[in-house]
Amino acid sequence: MKSITIDPITRLEGHGKIHLFVNDDGSLANCYFQVPELRGFEIFARGRPVEEMARITTRICGVCPDAHHMAAAKAADAVYGAQLPPAAVKLRNLVYNAFFAGDHATHFYALGGPDFVCGPDAPPGERNILGVVAKVGLEAGKKVIAQRAAGQRIIEIIGGKKVHPVTAIPGGMSKRVSKEEQAEMIKLGEQMVEFGKFTIQVLNDVVLANKAYVDMILSDAYAHQTYNMGLVDANNKVNFYDGKVRVVGPDGKEHAKYEPKDYLDYVAEHVEPYSYLKYPYLKKVGWKGFVDGVDSGVYKASPLSRLNVSDGMATPLAQAEYERFYKTLTGDASGKTMVHATLATHWARVVELMYACEATLQQAKDDEITSDKIHNPPQGIVGEGVGIVEAPRGTLTHHYKTDQNGFVTEANLIVGTTNNNAPITMSIKRAAEGLIKKGTPITHGILNRIEMAFRAYDPCFGCATHSLPGEMPLELVIHDARSGDVVDVVCRNC
Amino acid sequence: MPELLKPLLVLCLGNEIISDDGFGPAVAREMAKEAETSRHVDVIFAPVAGFSLLDLLAGRRKALIVDTIRTGKAAPGTLHSFAADVLVPSHHLTSSHQISLPTALELGKRLGYAMPEHLDILAVEAQDLETLSEELTPSVRAAVSDALRLVRDWITQNGVEETSNER
């Protein structure tokens, strides 16, 4: 057994591990990954006023606090049977799009982008945002910082606090927006739209202009024919804050379109004996294992799947990019033919980024957001509610049952990343199959190619903990399939 | 012009609802009063990581980060104190969802922000970072008072002469 010594101060426990079981002939027998996950949400929630969940669940995830705020607030609206005034819905939409615009920008430039801008085989020391800035220019770095700041300022104006919003309450919002604040948000929205256009240009010049990268995106090693899930509005356009959940099969046929409250009729969770991870799947199709195809209940919920379930984008520049995305990858601009290439998720994220920026500007210009009527006090109590939004990394569900005083008695969460546990496992396996060969040493380059398969999903495992060093260490453990012995270990950030 | 920031920052990271990740917030709560009256040091609690660290650290001369860590080599509650440059080899930068502290610092420098000339870390060895709870585990809770002493020492050692004598 080969072991690698790691500097004790940087060696961290509780990090992500990918286990690969390799046969004697070098082929892959099995693969699974382990990540730290939070425990005890139900116990934690029980006995708390349901309206408090929107404030406190922002702490569950350091990456998408706004998503938890909105999903919990929508669930609390439903618990109280509250009807929101139009201005409150508009404010929530606006702040949520501003959040998306910042989050997607971070992922593209800091996390996903480096593989394309710097190249998948670039040394780790260059394959990061510093490498992106070195290649695209310092201006790009400054624009990313400004984009994040713009998003945070809008969250501060509407959400009351910079990072963790607090103003969505059952029946509406608790903070009005002034005319001056509206004017400021319009300016920020204009800046965001320019940033969206700039990002499309970067994507063009650096990624799409390089045939090798386009080939990599389309390669079989990173493709999966699964079902897709995402929220859509009344016109089947992508919507992050509200709408119905639409599920479309790998063949492009609609499998379901349902109200958030009915989610348990459509989604169930599979548990594997070797892992505490849950693998959600489509109940009506059934769990058939980690396999592709219309007969397998595996689905993904990601930027790519949101485009796949929609008939387009609700804003012009994003719609144009949507059409170019499908035209380039399938030959059919309508979007009716599914894109299955996992790495295309990065491009889908740019389409969504453009939409989030345009929607922010559009909604900031709507004078109704300065209305005084932003809250309808709830009149009664239903005692159960489901709230679903799209988190940047997938469909996020909060479900609460309460007593007659609104205190939580039962709680259930399906977070964005959890939806993708099965497709992530499959993507890792597929990527590994192509790379792990008998007698070939496992290098950091190979680890990165495998890591790319799941980085596309922008997962945030155990993201609630911010303990040092602030990024998830990842270990690749190679086992002998027969004996289970560890034959090699490659480690990153640990 | 934004008002001039105090030169020293004690940045307490963590999360109040995830067991031992509440260590940073606990230290920040204890330090809040004395920091308020100091002209030299801010003590901030922030449940953030990655890029947000850049926002918070820019403009400070020196900073101390208070956080949790899991080395697996020490008993829970053990305090680790070290300079930030030994934390993570700075070339290990690829991440699943965030940029690391060294990356945030380096990016800030390259973009022309005034980043701290020196960064120290005070981290407690955590026992539980997975259970949603507002309580620290007993050994980590017991480390808070020692951590407060070390934070105050750090403030003193970094050349700050407190003008008030509020302690």
Image: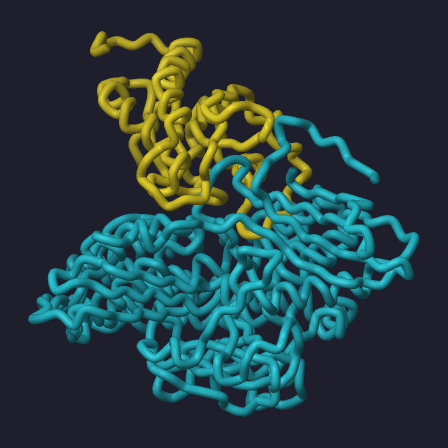
Chain colours: A cyan, B yellow
Note whether A150 is above or below A91 in the view shown: above
Which residue is nearer to you in this view: A183 or A157?
Answer: A157
- In the rendered structure, the answer to whether residue A307 lies left or right of residue A94 reads right
Q: Quadrant of residue A124?
A: top right
Q: Residue at x 70, y 45 (%)?
A: A126
Residue A316 makes an appearance in the image: yes
Quarter of the image that includes the N terminus of chain A: top right
Measured along the vertical axis of the image, is residue A149 above or below residue A352? above
Position in image of residue A485 (x %, y %): 79, 46
Rendering quarter of residue A456: bottom right
Residue at image x 49%, y 49%? A462
**A72 lies above or below B17:** below
- Is any part of residue B117 visible from this angle? no
Residue for point 37% across, 21% down: B142
Instruction: Give the quadrant of residue A226.
Output: bottom right
- In the foreground, A350 or B112: A350
Q: Residue B157 in the image: x percent, y percent? A: 43, 9
Q: Quadrant of the C terminus of chain A?
A: top right
Task: Give the tally of numbered discs.
Answer: 0
**Where's residue B149, x and y in %?**
37, 13
Q: Nearer the viewer, residue A149 or B156?
A: B156
Q: Point out residue A75 in the picture as x, y percentages from the top left corner.
A: 26, 67
Residue at position x 54%, y 32% in the image: B70
Position of residue A325 relative to residue A29, above or below, is below
